[in-house]
Amino acid sequence: MNYRHAYHAGNFADCVKHALQHHILAALRRKPAPFRVLDTHAGIGAYDLREERAERTGEWRAGIGRLEGIAEGPLAPWLSAVREFGWPPLYPGSPALSRAMLREGDRLVLCELHPEDQEELRARIGRDRRVAVHARDGWEAATALTPFPEKRGLLLMDPPFEQEGEFDRLADTIIAVSGRFRGCIQAAWYPVKHRAPVRDFHDRLRASGVRDLLACELWLREPTDPTRLNGCGLVVSNGPWVPEGSFEAVAGGILRALLERLGQGEPGQGCTVTRLTDE
């Protein structure tokens, strides 16, 4: 409840998450059947990076601030959506990205517990009948609100990792939702500070029996300092295939393009897409 994403909006971790999220949503739109997105930790939805909270940290300057001018390649579709939203200086968070991709029959459910952020989110959504905002614990909602009535869609989990046990809660939720909604695409963000917690998280998922899990990671330096956000990852289940190739291949291209712009040449920087479990 203390975490406020406005201080970190547009940083390198947002770029990783949102570029991959946009690709998943674009793949869902390729079929005419409606889909649903459930965003368990929504925040305020979008961010003005001139605002005091964003300027206080300036993290966006080493993130979205380094991606201006890209008009082709793996990042172009997402960055086109970012520019259409109003960048610079406005940056779309995951709710704004999802909302922009909705068609008439699609639905978006946003969960946010922080009272001030929830109020700001509701004001931003307005009377859009395709979108529902819940003052609800995202972990509880992930199982209570699945499977979706549409039978297809994306469960996006981006917890703040401000409490102990977040990796366990993330693994528990992925496993539970997979058991009740096999066809759901799940995308779960996590920090990479040092290797041990991430290794344990991956091992838990490998042993779970959940099929078709990929870990997409980018790190700006060797992840050996547990006090720094050295990198981040997105575990994706049921990554969508598109004519351009498998999700595994497309995600790898997105991460490499991000690293080329966001990397600062520190020892140990890199990116990888690792298959945790087979399809």
Image (cartoon, rainbow, N blue to C red):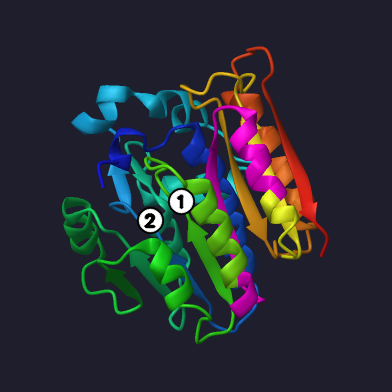
Label 1 sits on a secondary structure element that is loop
| Magenta-highlighted residues | 178-203
Which of the 4 image quarters holds residue 54?
Answer: top left
The residue at the point 26 percent across, 26 percent down is: 55
User: Residue 182 magenta-drawn?
Assistant: yes
- Mark yes or no: residue 234 visible: yes
Q: Are marks 2 and 1 in contact (CB under 8 Å)?
A: yes
Q: Earlier in the sequence, mark 2 or mark 1?
A: 2
List x then y, in percent, for residue 235: 63, 51
Residue highlighted by disc 1: 158
List x then y, in percent, for residue 116: 16, 52
Amino acid identity at mark 2: His
Task: Judge by depth and name the residue closer to the eye, 253 or 118.
Answer: 118
Label 2 sits on a secondary structure element that is loop
The residue at the point 21 percent across, 63 percent down is: 122
Residue highlighted by disc 2: 41
Which of the 4 image quarters holds residue 205?
Answer: bottom right
List x then y, in percent, for residue 50: 25, 31
Compared to residue 9, the image places residue 187 above or below, namely below
